[in-house]
Amino acid sequence: MNLFQDVRRNYGNDAVKNIRDLENIERKIARHRNHLTFTHRCKQHGVTPSSLRIRCPIKTIKAKNIVEKAQKELARERIRVISNQIKSYEKERAVLKKDLETLTNDDTELRRHVEIHCENKGKSEHEKTKKRHKDKFERLKNKEWSRKVSNAASAEPDLSGTQLKRWVINTSDRKLTKPQTTLLAKGLNFAVSVDKIPNDEFIVACEKACWAIPNAEAQNLRAEVAGVLKSAKIPPPNISYDERKALRELQKDQSLIIMGADKGRSTVVTEKDTYEEKVKNMLSDTRTYEKLKGDPTGSYKRKLVGILQRLKEDSKINDSQYKLLYPTAEVTPRLYCTTKIHKEGNPVRPIVDYTGSIAYQTSKALGEILAPMVGKTEHHVVNSRQLAEDLAGVFIEEGDIFNSHDVVSLFTNTPIDKTLSIIKNRLSDDKTLKNRTNLNVDDIMELLEFVLTTTYFSFRGLYTNKSSEPPWGAHVVQSSPTYSWNGSNKKLLPQHPWSVSLRCGRDMLTTSWKSSKKGLRNNSRNISTQSTPLRTSSSRTKRKKTTRYRSLTPSLSGRTMDL
């Protein structure tokens, strides 16, 4: 039998009206809750609902900021008003339920049927308004996104159509979905906004910092951090719902490896088995790599601590420097590889993560000592801008040959013994060394030799030693090959009358006369001999007529940007 007919026959029209009012209240609560959710999402995503937009005839930046601030305040006020309205409806619903008990003479079975009926009406209204608000929000968000993209088109990469293939290189057999591709195209440095502020991590980090400062300062720091965390707000999401779902899918897929390309900002997706097979094939070269039975970190740590203790006893480093250089952790350097997508077969480039290892701080300190000596040669070029400026006023005569020399595998082919010899000579000639450190040349060379010969690393639980080159990833290693390359320049350049000699990074640019072409080839070969340890590859461009270097500047700038 119909619920309302039954109520009208047994309890009269007043009871029917009461149930109708309850039904309407449930619908209103459902609509207002969806409206509240919609407004919250708009506020979080920086989207202004159409009803809250303000038109301003003043087209200045200050007026624009005032309007945006006012629209945000209106959104907050709407949230407050809707929340209060929902509370008012809930109170009204409670009153109607009490009246229903009185009108129905406390009929428990009837009230249960009425509650189920009103609940179903509320759910139906909720689903209907939810769909409407969701569609409206997507339209507003897409419109706002299009506006932001049009305003910042020059700053954002093109992630549409064929451009995605340049930003995401998929070498696996798995087909990526569109949300997965657009997510990866943002780059590996893209920071996804959190959905919860990690208070515990901030508190732990604060306590660690408080150990090293006086108690009064520690108390002030704790109070400031507590105040910041208390007022902190969750940042608005910077990826869509589909992209966040794609992120979870990629995280769960253990068969894929996602890494950066060796050159450029592209993201490479490859299968884990293929990646590990390439790395293991590289490490199987017994002439270059030596497998270790265990982790040698402990023995290396004891050796470094012995050196540091002696330097401290000799008053060459103070207590704070000793604590900074002392290896508190025993983190093993970790090997990972990047994919060379610009080469056939996509080979991998090995890189060792030296962060947190026993000699990490020592390497940083040595790098600061050696840094002022880098770039002191007459042929050194800082960057492509300086190169373009230097070449702007140079002429290439008719018949001249323009030469580009590129060091083959600079870090791999850098000999440690000869590099140490060159650095020692440079340190001995450096008159400003005493102004930078209390260490003498022998002390620096002892620490430097320790860092450059600590060439072990781990990969998938296996320990390997690389004895023929310095440890990639250490700070001091970034400048060590430079000294060896500079030494090679000094031996190569005087042997031939080159009119221009400039060096940037691992490349050297020269010009020579047509008649000296044979001598150029001979000198290029000589770089890989024992007297000059680094091996280069060369390319030549012959000019048919006299021209100013300025005409070559655009192409040269593009070439040196890759250095």
Image: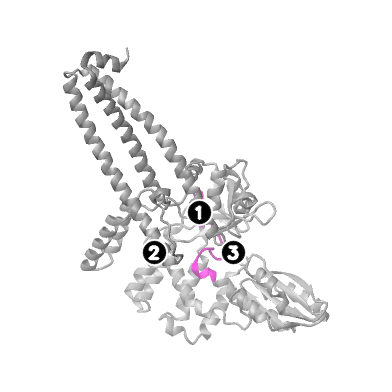
Residue 468, given in percent of the width and then of the height, sits at: 59, 64
Residue 558, given in percent of the width and then of the height, sits at: 66, 69
Point 18% across, 26% down: residue: 99
Pick the residue in front: 298 or 333: 333
Q: Marks 2 and 3, how far apart in space?
A: 25 Å
Pick the residue in front: 335 or 193: 193
User: Which of the two discs, 1 and 2, labels the residue nearer the N terminus?
Assistant: 2
* Dot 1 amino acid type: Ser
Task: Say which quadrant the C terminus sits in.
Answer: bottom right
The residue mark sitting in front, 3 or 1, is 1
> Which coloring applies here?
one colour
One can see residue 197 in this view = no
One can see residue 281 in this view = yes
* Dot 2 amino acid type: Pro
- Residue that carries the numbered disc 1 in the rendered image: 458
Queried whether the magenta region covers residue 22, the answer comes back as no
Task: Say which quadrant the N terminus sits in.
Answer: top left
Q: Residues within 10 Å of mark 2 (few under 14, many from 20)?
A: many
Q: Which mark is residue 327?
A: 2
**What's drawn in magenta, residue-wise?**
457-478
Q: Residues within 10 Å of mark 1 (few under 14, many from 20)?
A: many
Point 60% across, 60% down: residue: 264
User: Which of the two discs, 2 and 3, labels the residue nearer the N terminus?
Assistant: 2
- Residue that carries the numbered disc 3 in the rendered image: 468
